[in-house]
């Protein structure tokens, strides 16, 4: 058999797997309302907590979910450009409960009337049951601008976040690793109605990048598996109440609309 025929046969075997491996799954739109409480302290630092509900309709890929996420955090600015913080996230989901502590570093700068932000974090998810504990690093890049309209401040903002799971040893059922495990693009308009009250409606598009083993039917044909992108549209609304250490509002470096 000639080399050309061998290459053709190899291509016929590989191409279906590659095409299927790059398939895209679209989930129904999810609703993520979130209630936030924020305490501004005198030393340019904040204590905050939030409660979020993540609701997804039933689809061919899931039975519908109604998940709860509780977060709490502390963040302190040591200059106008730099801040650091710690957070904790408890999630009660259909897949099980988890608690995730996180350490973050944030930088902000100004360019052409825009505020540019970079947020880098390390986290470690402690998951119950048979699920593996998992470390991850996340990078968020965003740009926002504050527009004053009368007594109201509008904060249009675009953000992209990429998450990478840190695995010292890949699982046996995932021999290949994706460079980025999750990506999220978010567009929003923060509405500051007063020193104490903010509304932030947003739309996001989340993509989970997975690699799973191929599944075959009785005839040996590939039915699923490989490199798959799971896309989930998200509509959210963050409602934030801000209190002050001495009860009266004071000048401070404000936190972004997205913690």
Image (cartoon, rainbow, N blue to C red):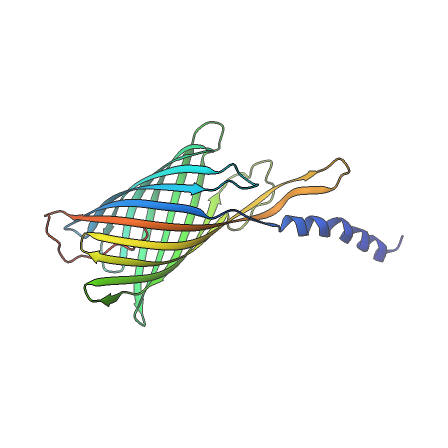
Please name the residue shown 35% across and 46% down the image.
Answer: 33
Would you say 1 lies left or right of 213 here?
right
Q: Nearer the viewer, residue 1 or 58?
A: 58
Residue 206 placement, left or right of 71: right
Q: Residue furthest right?
A: 1
Q: Quadrant of residue 107?
A: bottom left
> Looking at the image, which is closer to me, 145 or 154?
154
x%, y% of residue 256?
29, 55
The vertical placement of 179 against 117, above or below, is: above
Residue 148, above or below 66: below
Identified at 25% across, 53% down, the residue is 198
Question: What is the residue that sits farthest to the top in this orientation?
Answer: 129
Number of numbered discs visible in the structure rendering = 0
Q: Residue most toward the bottom?
A: 112
In this rendering, is residue 146 above or below 213?
below
Give percent across and percent down for residue 245: 13, 47
As rendered, which of 222 and 189 lies closer to the eye? 189
Q: Residue 65's x, y, as percent?
A: 46, 37
From the top left corner, tell me how far across and down residue 47 is, in percent.
22, 44
Residue depicted at x 36% and y 39% = 69
Q: Nearer the viewer, residue 170 or 88?
A: 88
């Amino acid at each position: 058999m000639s080399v050309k025929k061998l290459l053709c046969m190899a291509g016929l075997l590989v191409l279906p797997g590659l095409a299927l491996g790059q398939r895209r799954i679209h989930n129904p739109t999810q609703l993520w309302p979130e209630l936030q409480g924020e305490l501004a302290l005198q030393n340019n630092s904040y204590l905050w907590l939030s409660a979020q509900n993540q609701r997804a309709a039933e689809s061919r890929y899931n039975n519908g979910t109604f998940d709860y996420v509780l977060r709490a955090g502390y963040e302190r600015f040591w200059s106008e450009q730099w801040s650091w913080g710690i957070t904790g996230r408890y999630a009660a989901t259909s897949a099980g409960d988890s608690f995730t502590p996180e350490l973050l570093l944030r930088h902000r700068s100004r360019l052409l009337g825009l505020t540019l932000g970079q947020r880098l974090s390390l986290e470690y998810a402690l998951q119950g049951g048979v699920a593996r504990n998992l470390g991850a690093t996340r990078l968020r890049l965003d740009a926002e601008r504050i527009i004053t309209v009368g007594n109201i401040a509008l904060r249009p903002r675009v953000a992209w976040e990429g998450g990478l799971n840190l695995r010292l040893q890949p699982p046996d059922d995932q021999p290949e690793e994706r460079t980025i495990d999750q990506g999220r693009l978010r567009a929003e308009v923060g509405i500051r109605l007063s020193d104490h009250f903010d509304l932030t409606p947003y739309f996001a598009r989340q993509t989970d990048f997975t690699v799973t083993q191929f599944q075959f039917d009785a005839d040996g044909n590939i039915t699923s598996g490989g490199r798959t992108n799971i896309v989930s549209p998200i509509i959210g609304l963050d409602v934030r109440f801000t209190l002050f250490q001495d009860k009266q509002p004071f000048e401070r470096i404000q936190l972004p609309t997205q913690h």
